[in-house]
Amino acid sequence: MLIDLFYLLSICCFILGLKFLSSPRTARRGNLLSMAGMFIAVVVTLFEKQIIDYTYIVAGIIIGGLIGAVAARRVKMTAMPQMVAVFNAFGGAASALVVYAQFIRFPTLTDPATTITIVLSLFIGMLTFVGSMMAFGKLQGLVSGAPVVFPGHKALNALLHLIVLGAGVFFVLNPASHGLAILAAIVVLSGVIGITMVLPIGGADMPVVIALLNSYSGLAAAASGFVINNYVLIVSGALVGASGLILTDLMCKAMNRSLTNVLFGAVGQETGPAAGAAKRNVTRYTPLDAAMMLSNAQSVIIVPGYGLAVAQGQYALQEVAELLKKAGVGVRYAIHPVAGRMPGHMNVLLAEANVPYDMLKDLDEINEEFQNTDVVLIVGANDVVNPASREKGNPLSGMPILDVDKARSVIIIKRSLSPGFAGVDNELFYDPKTMMIFGDAKEMLVKISGALKEEI
Amino acid sequence: MTGELIVSIYIFVLAIFAGFELITRVPPLLHTPLMSGANAVSGITLVGALISAGAGRGGLATLLGFAAIVFATINVVGGFMVTDRMLEMFKKEERH
């Protein structure tokens, strides 16, 4: 009874913690509040009378805590998607393990309500674990980032689901006969489904997959809450599940793709330059030209893409922005929802490079502003500024883009004319008001800031 | 259908709605910390793991419970710490 009231307190902490995340001013406090909620839940659980032996508990918490703390301190901000993928995996694994252990301890739990939730939570938990490890492998480059499809892929997937469903139904009907073995089979097969689910998804679609697996890790926790009858698990799991679903939906909208298309479409093959692209003429400009143009502008909007982070050019970019601001130029950053490799990733990368958050504007906030802007500086972004998305009949059609072509002039820093993930040639490169600067993003930005220092 | 299950389902559904309301208010600026923070919260399974590992039955159940504690603690500690590390970097523009 008393324990349940403390669980309610920790639920309140989680809810308020999420509420505080609605503003960057209160977000850190919100996270601390969630931490407090978790601390309360863990401490009161230790008073649970079922617990008689603390050896494994202490050992597990020390080992897990050390690994978690070291990982959290060491991880590079560019590697955040991998980190979140691994943590999702561990959350899913923990939920599945708890449920399996519960059935070992209480093999007499045979009412359908419990057995159905046992099957569900093992399925979701293992799917999350293996699927997230695959996503980690893809992001880390251990597994090919290109979508892997083989003949009969969909048929195999459907078959695996059917077998799991069949085994689940059998278990619910006869939980007493070979229950543990059947559950073990469900665990293994759910893992295989995790592999076949993530393999065909291309690198560019990883933001969607990570958000979806984030949701699953929450649902896995909620499902195990049903099994062990614990409301704090059910509520927290549901909150995380909802959060992941919203982010999944936002990412799909930002790419104008449906979730089914992301999961089964196998889009994002590695492509070479679009045919015929090489024949057209583009005028090359130098960083000096760019510096001149930027310093003469009244207003500048910077559009960063993941290419910037790959080149580690964030700091050089912010130096350019600072120099311009000191010279009285209005500077802002326009962040497309899929600019990074997970939702909100680019904001974190820029915050790390000391960009104040009030300079970071999202698509809806800034799109109206381009028409009143003198210069747009695009670094390492391509598909998110491709006007082809406004036309019909190509892979980008209908995707919301940053309307950079409405600005008076555009500077693009890019290695080559090759198209982005979507494989669609970008008309913007050939627009007369566009200044193309070819080269490594960081190197070019350093040159621009050097030139700006001399000019200003 | 047991009464207890019905209550659980009510709680689950209402929590999903609360989650939707809360999370649609989080600006895109903070979506990465939201994910890593939510991730840490999903490590709440730790609560279940503690009971599995501490029930003193020994054998497979305790071993699985122990593994679950390790996984969930990595999730919780790592998730909250990295979220804090990120949120610390978000600073407001200094007015000169």
Image (tube, coloured by chain):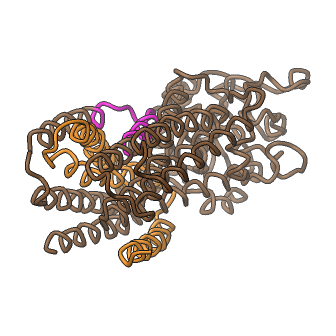
Nearest to the observer: residue A164 or residue A412: A164
Q: Is residue A84 magenta?
A: yes
x then y, percent, for residue B83: 33, 48
A444 sits left or right of A84 in the view:
right
x then y, percent, for residue A339: 59, 43
Could one spot residue A456 in this view of the protein?
no
A31 sits left or right of A178 in the view:
left
Could one spot residue B48 in this view of the protein?
yes
A59 sits left or right of A298 in the view:
left
Which residue does the image show at 16% across and 69% down from the upper left?
A: A3
Nearest to the observer: residue A176 or residue A366: A176
What chain is colored brown? A
Which residue does the image show at 39% across and 45% down from the upper left?
A: A96
A217 sits left or right of A381 in the view:
left
Which residue does the image show at 47% across and 72% down from the upper left?
A: B13
Residue furthest to the front in view is A177
What chain is colored orange? B
Vertical arrangement, residue A88 with respect to residue A115, above or below: above
Nearest to the observer: residue A364 or residue A38: A38
The quadrant in which the N terminus of chain A is found is: bottom left
x then y, percent, for residue A231: 31, 68
Q: Is residue A79 magenta?
A: yes
Which quadrant of the figure has residue A413?
A: top right
What is the number of callouts on the image? 0
Magenta part, dominant SS: helix
x then y, percent, for residue A216: 49, 51
Nearest to the observer: residue A15 or residue A376: A15
Vertical arrangement, residue A258 with respect to residue A153, above or below: below
Which residue does the image show at 66% across and 52% down from the upper left?
A: A252
Q: Which residues are magenta?
A: A71-91
